[in-house]
Image (cartoon, helix red, strand yellow):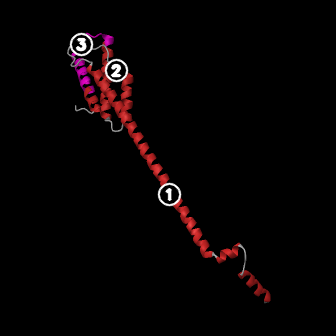
Amino acid sequence: MAVLHECLQTGATSTGVIGWLNANAGAVTGIATAALAILTGVYVFLTMKIAGAALEQTRLMARAQDAVRREREHARSRHVRHLIGELDQLTFPLLEPQLMPRGVPWTPDELEDLRVLAAAVEGTDERAVSQALRALRELASFAALLYARGSSAVSAPERFTWNENLQAARAALRVLAGEPH
C-alpha cells in the first residue's frame, strides 16, 4: 500500500511541461483562443480582399464583353449602311431595259459578312437578315443572268421582280439599320 501512495503523490506533483500546462490550463486556453481569433480575423480579411478582387475582375470582364458587343453592333451597322449605299447605286424603279445594271456592287463575301455579323450580334432580327440576303442574292443572280444573255431582253415581269427585290432588300436592310421602314 505504501507503493500506491507514493505513485499517487508522484502523479499529483508532476514536473516539467506537463506540470506547467496543468498548473496554467486557464491561461493556455485563453492564449490559444486569442491566437485562433487573430488567425480567423486574418483569414476573414484575406477572404474579403480575394472576394473584392474577384468582384472587380467580374466587372472588368462584363465591361470587356460589353465593349465586344458594342463593336460587333457597330460593325454590323457599318456593313448594313454600306449595303444600303450600294443598293442606292442601282436603278429603281427599273422601267427601261437599257437602264439595267451590268452587275451589282456587292460581292458574295459581303453577303456572307452580313450573315456572320448578324449572327454575332444578339437580338438581330433574323427574319430581316434572311429577307435581305435572299433579295440581294436574287438581284445579283438576275443581273448576272441578264448580263450573260444581253441587256435588251428584259421582260416586264423581270423588271417587276427586280423592283420587288430591290424594295425588299432596302426594307430589310433598313430594319437591320434600325430605321423606320
Inspect the image, locate mark 1, and give the three-letter code of the amino acid beneath it: Phe
Label 2 sits on residue: 106
Give the residues in magenta. 147-169
- Displayed quadrant of residue 117: top left
Compare residues 169 and 145 and report the one nearer the observer. Answer: 169
Among all residues in the image, which is located at the extreme bottom? 1
Inspect the image, locate mark 2, and give the three-letter code of the amino acid beneath it: Trp
Mark 3 or mark 1: whose residue is earlier in sequence: 1
Q: Which mark is residue 99?
A: 3
The mark lying in front, picked from 3 and 1, is 1
Q: Position of residue 151 (x, y in %)?
A: 27, 11
Label 1 sits on residue: 45
Left or right, 38 with reference to 9: left
Q: Tell me the distance, in whole angstroms, between the alpha carbons under discs 1 and 2.
A: 61 Å
Q: Which mark is residue 173?
A: none
Mark 1 or mark 2: whose residue is earlier in sequence: 1
Q: Position of residue 3 (x, y in %)?
A: 79, 86
The quadrant of the rendering that contains the C terminus is top left
Residue at position x 70%, y 72% in the image:
17
Q: Position of residue 104 (x, y in %)?
A: 32, 18
The mark lying in front, picked from 3 and 2, is 2
Q: Tell me the distance, in whole angstroms, between the alpha carbons under discs 3 and 2.
A: 18 Å
